Image (cartoon, rainbow, N blue to C red):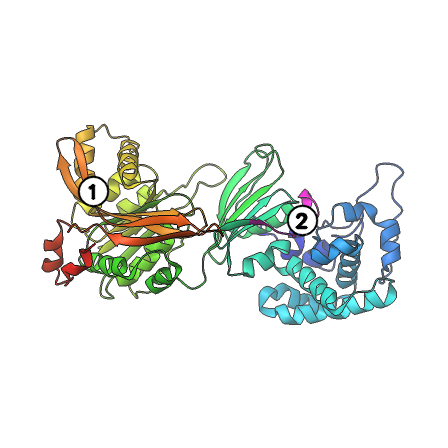
Amino acid sequence: MRSLSLLERLGGKPKENEKPKSEEVSALKNVVQPPPQPSPPPQVEKNPPKTYTLEKNLQDDSRVVASSFVGRRAFEKTNDRSHELKLAIHRRIVDEMTPEEQDLLMQGESAREQIKNIIAAYSARELAESTYTLSRAERSTLIEDICNELLGLGPLEPLLQDDSITEIMVNGSKKIFIEQAGKLKLTDIYFYDDAHLMSIIERILAPLGRRVDESSPLVDARLADGSRVNIIIPPLSLVGPVVTIRKFSKNALSIKNLISFGTLSEQMAEFLKACIKARLNILVSGGTGSGKTTTLNAMSSFIPENERIVTIEDAAELKLQQRHVVTLESRPANLEGRGAITIRDLVKNALRMRPDRIIVGEVRAGEALDMLQAMNTGHDGSLTTAHANAPRDVLSRLETMVLMAGIDLPVRAVRTQVSSAIDLILQQSRIRDGSRKITHITEVQGMEGDVIILQDLFQYVQDYIDENGKSVGHFEATGLQPNFMDKFKMNGVELPLSIFNS
C-alpha cells in the first residue's frame, strides 16, 4: 500500500490535461479547486491567476467552501466568512509557494516555526487585498489553525497539546467534548463538516497502514505520542464519525503525585512499596477511566533496577523508568484478516524471555489463564489490571476470563489457581466529583471450601459531599495484618506493624 503524502491526505486530486511538477505539489494545488458541475460543464481557465482575492472566492468557490478542510474556531463565531478567508490564504500559499518553501512543508513539525512565518507572509498579502480585518489575536489564531491543518490534526491539535486534558471525544463534526480534572466539558471547537473530520481520521490512520470505511467501520489506533484512539463511523454511528482519544501524560506520574492528588495515603503508599519489593503478585481493578494504568505505572517505580521486566499491552501506555525493560505490544489483523498477535500470544512468549517480572497492561480474555499460570510458576512480583467494580467482582471476572481460554476446567480448579496466584487486589474508583481513589487494598487469603477468602487491609471512607459537590473522606487501615508477612521477611523487607493500626 503506497504511503499517502501530506498533500494527498488533504484531499487533492491531479488536474486533468496538466502535467504536474511533482506528485505532491500537484495534489496540494488542487485541494481547493471547485468540484466539476454536472451541468453545464465548468469553465476552467488554462492559466489561473496567481492572486485570489476574498471577494472572488466568495463568488466562485461556494461549493469548495462547503467541503473545506478548514475548521472553525472561537473567533469565527463573530464572522462566518473566516473559513472563506482561510481557504483563500491556503490557495495563495499552494499557488505561489517556492520550491524552498515546499521543501520546508515536507519537513513537517521539525520546521513548524518557519512554516508559520511563511503562512504569516501569505496571510498578510491576502488581507491587504481583501476587505477582511483581523485583530492581532485573531491573526495569530488564523496562522496557528492553518499550520495545524497542514502539519497536525486540525482543530484537535490544541486539545492534544493541553496536558490538563485526559480524554477527547468527537461526537460527529459539531460536538467535541473533553475530560478535564475528571469532568466532561463541551468545547467551542468543531469541524466544518463530516468530510473535514474524515480527512483528519485518514491522516491518523495513514501512517499506520490502517483504514476505516463502510466495510470496516471501526478501528483502534495509536497516535505518535502513544495516545490511544478509537474510531467508529456510519453506518454504525448515527451521529457521524466518532473519535475517542485517550491521552497519556507526557511525564509518568509518581506515587508522590498520586498522594498529592488524594488517590491514596502515605501509609498505603509505604505498604505498596513493601509489597512490590517483597515480590507479591498484585491485581489492580477498577472501572473505565478510574486510573488503573496510572496507578500500575506509579507502583512499577518500586521495582529494583537489577530486574528484567517484560511489559505486555494492547497499546504501549506504561512508561517504566528502569533500564532493563522489554516492551511488547499486540497487533491487530491486517486488511485480509490475518497476522493478529494477541495478548495471550505475547504472555506465552514472555515466559521464554527470562523475565523477573511480567506486567500485563490489562487482561480481558483467555490471557488471564496464562497470566495466572505464570504467577504460579516462579514469576512472582507480576502486575496486571482488570475491569471490575469491587474486589469480589474481579475474582468472578477472572473466573470467566479463564473459561474464555477454551479449556474446560472445574470452577474449583479455577478458583484455586486464582487464590494461589493473586496476593493483593487494589480497587480503584472514580468518585462522583471526578477524583480517583484507591477505595480498597484487599488481601487474597486463600480457599475455604469453594469460596475465596478476602480481607480488607485499607479502605477509603467517604464522609460527605460538600456544597461544591466534592467528596470529603479519609483513608484508614482496618487494623488487620496480612497473612503474607513472612514474604516480607524472606525478601528482606522491613515494614513496621504500626502501619496496620486503625
Indicate the quadrant where residue 106 lies: bottom right
Q: Could you classify mark 1 by the number of other residues whose Cα lies within 10 Å: few (under 14), some (14-19), or many (20 or more)?
A: some
Q: Is residue 70 above or below residue 37?
A: below
Give me the C-alpha separation between circle 1 and circle 2. 49 Å
| Highlighted magenta segment, given as a residue range | 185-195
Residue pictured at 42% horizontal, 44% vertical: 288
Residue pictured at 53% horizontal, 38% vertical: 218
Query: Which quadrant of the figure contains the C terminus?
Result: bottom left
Amino acid carrying mark 1 in the image: Gln
Q: Is residue 38 magenta?
A: no
Residue underneath mark 1: 373
Residue pictured at 57% horizontal, 50% vertical: 185
- x and y percent of residue 317 in the render? 40, 54
135 and 111: which is toward the camera: 135
243 and 355: which is toward the camera: 243
- x and y percent of residue 330 in the render? 38, 47
Indicate the quadrant where residue 250 lies: bottom left
- x and y percent of residue 391 in the render? 28, 41
| Residue 390 relative to residue 339: left or right | left
* Residue 105 in view, yes or no: yes
Q: Could you classify mark 2 by the number of other residues whose Cα lies within 10 Å: few (under 14), some (14-19), or many (20 or more)?
A: many
Q: Disc 2 on helix, strand or loop?
A: loop
- x and y percent of residue 372 in the render? 22, 42
Residue underneath mark 2: 191
* Residue 329 in view, yes or no: no
